[in-house]
Amino acid sequence: MTTKSTQVAIQIFFLILFGILVFLGKPQIWMILFVASMIFAFAFSRIYCGYICPINTLMKPVKWIKKKLHLKDHEVSPLLEKPATRIVVLVLLISLFLISVVSGKKLPVLPAMVLLGAILTLFFHEELWHRFLCPYGLFLSFPSKKAKYFITISSDLCVNCTKCAKVCPSKAVIRKDKHEILKDECLVCGECIRSCPTNAISYK
């Protein structure tokens, strides 16, 4: 994995690129990048989420503001945590894209998704977006299950301190006999790796 500073630099670069493409009215170029990321996910997991996604990048300053304002996470309705919720959001997103293509009108679908993700993070734990609402995450979860490289926890080195579970933004770290990471839900953000006191977590 890269250092935190390198990761942040990469995230800022892609956030600026996203902004430029939206300003130029060429968000379709970003979708090409996303499709390419889906292909890469078969090898490198959800690298898109951890390094490229503008929504995930914007969540960082939103979380900082949230902390400064002492805002607490609201409880999430069990209805939103059902798998069907992601399907509904995905169908809505595809419908909006089709309407945009058929009507010839440029609907700000991608900027709206970014804004929605950021606003929700201000009032709810970011897991709500990453695991239950993000349609891009749903697409990426399928190839990530077959990924060759992914973040894993060594059962020999894990001391069950739970630090990794506490910092995981998507709650992808689960407890069995030892802690494990759900490959399809892991954002490959590296927070768990940096938090582990025994170096039990690695990307390989």
Image (cartoon, rainbow, N blue to C red):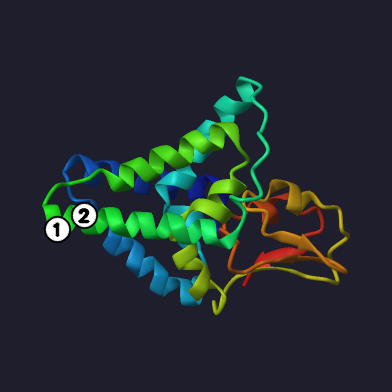
**Compared with residue 4, is residue 138 higher up or lower down, i.e. above or below?**
below
Q: Are marks 2 and 1 in contact (CB under 8 Å)?
A: yes
Q: Which residue is mark 2?
A: 99
**Compared with residue 110, is residue 179 higher up or lower down, i.e. above or below?**
below
Q: Which residue is mark 1?
A: 102
x, y percent for residue 128: 58, 47
Q: What crowding class fits label 2: few (fewer than 14 Cα within 10 Å), some (14-19), or many (20 or more)?
A: some
Q: Quadrant of the C terminus?
A: bottom right
Residue at point 57%, 60% (across, down) = 188
Residue at point 63%, 26% (across, down) = 67
Q: Which mark is residue 85?
A: none
Residue 31 located left or right of residue 199: left
User: Can residue 9 be seen by looking at this rendering?
Assistant: no
The kind of residue tagged 1 is Val
**Compared with residue 149, is residue 28 higher up or lower down, i.e. above or below?**
above
Q: How many badges with numbers are in the image?
A: 2
